[in-house]
Amino acid sequence: MCTPTPGTTNPGELLTSDTTPLTREQAQALAIDLSRRSTPAEGGFCTFQPVVNGSACPFNLDCHNCDKFVLSGADLLYWRRKREQWRLLAEGAPDDATADYLHRYFEPTARAIGGLEKALAGLGLLEDALALDLRKPQDYFHRVWSTVFRATDLADAGNEEPDENSDARTAEEADPEQDIA
């Protein structure tokens, strides 16, 4: 746990806490196998097939608002650094209105980061993701690199507490063709 900073939306509220993992079934239902074709994007991967095949992005490279944008465990440290950067910007804001705006603007991304942490914890990959040293050669075939999740699904998972009675898709119910469409 860390202590709250003056730039928080709700002073006194803790910014981080222990990650409550998704169940293994919930995490597997969100997972997409990256061994299918993809192309790197800033902070993740694009799975939109025309882009992967070399076409221009029809979404104006707005990856972070695209349902074809996926994150892997290897992206976790990047996004944690981004979250800290936005917190520092909000802390240094000239007034409360600006700080509130920065918190609201980054909120969907913060939820996705929380969902990624929960999904990785549910698959037993959180410690591997946190231990990555991106300055050294990596094993790109390791599950922390090849298992990815849609950012939009992660944002939804970051909002809710794990529930044993959840109606989340199981891995068998997931339509693999729909995941890459």
Image: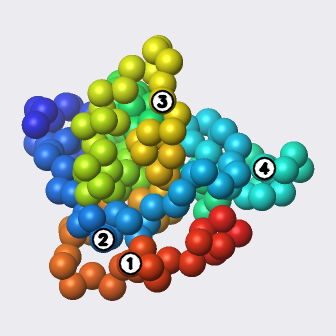
Taking the spot 60% from the left edge, 51% from the top edge, the residue there is: 35
Q: How is the image coloured?
A: rainbow
Give the alpha-carbon distance from disc 2 to disc 3, as whole Å: 25 Å
Camera-side residue of 137 and 16: 137
Q: Give, as a three-letter code, the residue at label 4.
A: Val
Provide the secondary structure element on which disc 2 rests: helix
Which residue carries the number 1 mark?
A: 170
Give the alpha-carbon distance from disc 4 to disc 1, as whole Å: 27 Å
Q: Are marks 2 and 1 in contact (CB under 8 Å)?
A: yes
Q: Give, as a three-letter code, the residue at label 1.
A: Thr
How would you rate the neighbour count of disc 2 (Cα within 10 Å): few for under 14, some for 14-19, many for 20 or more? some
Which residue carries the number 4 mark?
A: 52
Q: Nearer the viewer, mark 2 or mark 3?
A: 3
How would you rate the neighbour count of disc 4 (Cα within 10 Å): few for under 14, some for 14-19, many for 20 or more? some
The part of the image, by quadrant, that contains residue 33 is bottom right
Provide the secondary structure element on which disc 1 rests: loop
Q: Earlier along the polypeptide chain: callout 2 or callout 4?
A: 2
